[in-house]
Image (spheres, rainbow, N blue to C red):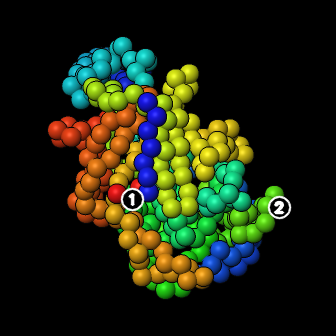
């Protein structure tokens, strides 16, 4: 059916000696999409933790005044040493559960594998969250680095066009872009991520105080010049690119990925077969077509298949069409077009596309600091398919 819509854990083991061991560019002026200066990322070294230990040799005791006394002394020392060794071995067993004479060399010592709260896929450890505002008009395509995003939000901007907010944590591509300016609605949307880093090309002057007061780490070009560079493959302003690792170097306190309400697992029962689904903004549209061979939704923008310069076609394991209120904000662009404000708190309906089927759903986000949960119409959690998630914030 084709459908459309209008509008590190510590481990322990016993050593051979019976002791327990733990393994344990341009100025990029504010208020605009200014040029970024090309910069070099400094070579950083990973911290290395080293520890050395050893048992120093014991000093021999002095000889007694007689041979018998020396014999008794040696025998006493032997008995006390044997008793001490036995007590140490018993203590080692009681404290570590490991017999001193049989060290466990097979216990894993590496960190436990975590699961990303954004994709449901395994990852080595929780990593900082970097959100990047991505240009999405035709001259800005194909994108770069977008295929590595854990989450991609599609939102309406001025003149009915669309813009993307890509969220990276599990993987960082070498380059992402083109990068464009932030909007007021981004601040509320990102509150559920704690204090992430936000990379953007600029913002209108009236919005800057709100960005600086928001619980995030703002990274426009003037704050992180080494993280931006201009490409020579297309004209400005559609050629500003971000180097994600350099960006996070400029935001060392960016919060790591945390639960934002998504659940992953087996598909819920029911749903309707969907071969393709289109979501329309006034001057933009997204189409998601199911590929049984790839087990992914193939993404098209404005009627053209979406590709990246570094990773091929754009795909998603789950697509969420989140119906929400889109109202005029108190901000406008330089040409007088009013910026839409997309409400992402409250509750409403949604369509969840996964595994070639569409599931009617409800979404709920009680407040800006809370995550967004998706449930079936009867209130059960609706699990997403593990993998990248695209969320289209569509008008009701």
Upstream in the sequence, badge 1 or badge 2? 2
**Quarter occupied by the C terminus:** bottom left
SS at badge 1: strand
Q: Residues within 10 Å of mark 2 (few under 14, many from 20)?
A: few
Report which quarter residue 11 is drawn in: top left
Query: Which residue is at 49% across, 53% downward?
Result: 280
Residue 74 shown left or right of residue 317 in the figure: left
229 up-or-down from 80: above or below: below
- Residue nearest the viewer, comparing 24 with 336: 336
344 up-or-down from 377: above or below: below
* Residue 86 percent location from the top left of the image: 25, 19
Q: Which residue is the site of mark 1?
A: 395
Report which quarter residue 13 is drawn in: top left
SS at badge 2: loop
- Residue nearest the viewer, comparing 23 with 221: 221
Work out whether residue 280 can be spotted. yes
- Residue nearest the viewer, comparing 390 with 194: 390
* Residue 34 percent location from the top left of the image: 68, 76
Work out whether residue 78 can be spotted. no
Q: Which residue is the site of mark 2?
A: 232
């Amino acid at each position: 059916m084709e459908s459309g819509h209008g509008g590190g854990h510590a481990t322990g083991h016993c050593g051979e000696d019976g002791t327990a061991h733990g393994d344990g560019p341009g100025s990029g002026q504010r208020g605009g999409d200014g040029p970024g200066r090309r910069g070099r990322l400094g070579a950083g070294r990973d911290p290395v933790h080293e520890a050395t230990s050893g048992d120093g040799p014991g000093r021999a005791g002095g000889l007694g005044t007689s041979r018998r006394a020396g014999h008794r002394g040696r025998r006493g020392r032997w008995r006390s040493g044997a008793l001490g060794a036995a007590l140490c071995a018993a203590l080692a067993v009681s404290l570590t559960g490991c017999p001193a004479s049989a060290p466990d060399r097979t216990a894993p010592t590496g960190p436990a594998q975590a699961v990303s709260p954004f994709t449901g896929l395994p990852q080595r450890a929780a990593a900082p969250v970097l959100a990047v505002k991505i240009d999405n008009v035709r001259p800005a395509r194909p994108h770069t680095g977008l295929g590595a995003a854990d989450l991609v939000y599609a939102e309406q901007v001025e003149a009915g066009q669309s813009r993307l907010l890509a969220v990276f944590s599990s993987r960082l591509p070498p380059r992402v872009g083109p990068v464009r300016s932030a909007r007021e609605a981004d601040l509320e949307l990102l509150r559920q991520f704690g204090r992430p880093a936000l990379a953007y090309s600029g913002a209108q002057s009236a919005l800057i105080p709100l960005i600086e007061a928001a619980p995030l780490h703002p990274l426009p070009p003037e704050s992180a010049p080494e993280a931006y560079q201009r490409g020579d493959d297309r004209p400005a302003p559609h050629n500003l690119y971000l180097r994600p690792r350099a960006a996070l170097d400029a935001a060392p306190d960016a919060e790591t990925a945390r639960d934002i309400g998504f659940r992953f697992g087996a598909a819920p029962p029911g749903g309707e077969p969907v071969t393709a689904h289109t979501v329309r903004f006034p001057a933009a549209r997204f189409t998601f077509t199911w590929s049984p061979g790839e087990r992914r939704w193939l993404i098209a923008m404005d009627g053209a298949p979406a590709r990246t310069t570094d990773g091929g076609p754009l795909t998603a394991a789950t697509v969420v069409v989140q119906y929400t209120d889109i109202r005029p904000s108190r901000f406008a662009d330089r040409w007088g077009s009013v910026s839409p404000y997309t409400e992402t708190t409250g509750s409403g309906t949604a369509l969840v596309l996964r595994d070639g089927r569409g599931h009617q759903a409800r979404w709920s986000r009680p407040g800006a600091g809370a995550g967004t949960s998706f449930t079936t119409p009867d209130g059960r959690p609706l699990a997403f398919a593990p993998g990248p998630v695209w969320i289209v914030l569509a008008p009701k």
